[in-house]
Image: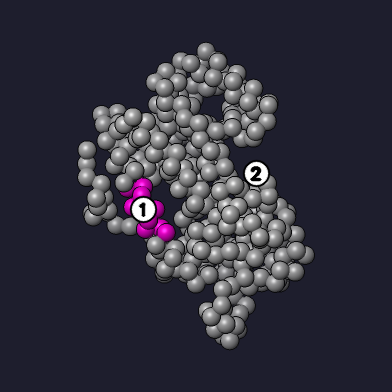
Amino acid sequence: MPSLTNPLKNEQVKTPSRRTLLRLSLGVLALRFTPSAWALADAAPLRVITLFQGATDSAVALGITPCGIVDSWSEKPTYRYLRSALEPVPHVGLETQPSLEDIALLKPDVIIASRFRHERIAPLLKQIAPVVMLEEVFEFKKTLALMGLALHRQQRADEVLARWQLRTAQLRQQLQHTFAGRWPPTVSILDVREDHIRSYLPASFPGSVITELGFGWSEASQAASGVSIKLTSKESLAVVNADIFFVFLRAEKPAVQRNYESLVQHPLWQQMRAPQQGQVWRVDGVAWSLSGGMLGANLMLDDVARLVTADAA
């Protein structure tokens, strides 16, 4: 087995440079602080409101307790993995429809938003406080880096990103040893819903993590655009055939459970490689699909690490 003592010895940690971050944030960070206000901000923690899940996750990863957050998509009002850190924090509505009145009443110093979600209300948000506007909601490393820069936590962000790079490199080595001549196996990430299935692609949040670990993708997944493929018929299952399935159920509803049970009993499912090889892994849908942040991504790594420990058992 390859040594795991220093997997980054010959691998540069790929974290964005300060110049790159400043360029990315130019024009989207509306800084309305006066010099004296900036001096005060350096002396005391900034009051931050996060308007999407990945920003909330990233704030906690940076050691910041926001003064306001939006409701989670499931496990409402806050994802279980974040509750202990965010229990006392007020909520300002939905990610898709935050309350401007509630935001204003909390008197934030900075608002973390996403152009994907909040472009239409950005002018109104900027009347309340400076806005850090991320392009997407799932680019977790960029979200962490830009928030670290904007919130005076760049050193903490660099440390978190370096630990991520180290952990993914170590896990990739362990996976290569585990699968040996079968490396890299192909993967499908399946999200089972009430009336259909979604297969996440390399450009998605979970797909980016799986790709970083070195797993392969089917030709159909590599050729598709976007972040997921929607399968409305079980007769389409062949397009997701892979060596490993990571599967989660979108909601804890009887209809979703029935769809999953119907899926695993279908003849086409039973003919695919992952079921035949006993490589179907149930994982946490919040971490894999809804978290959008560094802490959630690390929970994904916990799930993937089960492949190694299961082989060693």
Where is residue 62 shown, x and y percent of the image? 49, 62
Where is residue 60 shown, x and y percent of the image? 54, 59
Give, as a three-letter code, the residue at label 2: Glu
At label 1, counting other C-alpha atoms closer than 10 Å, the crowd grade (few under 14, some 14-19, many 20 or more) is some
Q: Which mark is residue 15?
A: none
As for residue 131 lying within the magenta part, the answer is no
Real-space CA distance between mark 2 and mark 1, rounded to the nearest whole angstrom: 29 Å
**Position above or below: 191 against 29:** above
Where is residue 4 shown, x and y percent of the image? 25, 46
Residue at which label 1 appears? 165
Q: Could you tell me which secondary element the residue under label 2 belongs to?
A: loop
Left or right of residue 240, residue 73 in this image = right
Give, as a three-letter code, the residue at label 1: Gln
Q: Which residues are magenta?
A: 160-169
Residue at which label 2 appears? 75
Q: Residue at x 57, y 85 (%)?
A: 35
At label 2, counting other C-alpha atoms closer than 10 Å, the crowd grade (few under 14, some 14-19, many 20 or more) is few
Q: How many marks on residues?
A: 2
Q: Could you tell me which secondary element the residue under label 1 belongs to?
A: helix
Decide which of tag 2 and tag 1 comes sooner along the chain: 2
**Position above or below: 227 against 253:** below
**Position above or below: 276 against 38:** above
Q: Residue furthest bottom?
A: 36
Q: Residue at x 51, y 63 (%)?
A: 63
Instruction: Name the foreground residue: 216 vs 251.
Output: 251
As for residue 163 lying within the magenta part, the answer is yes
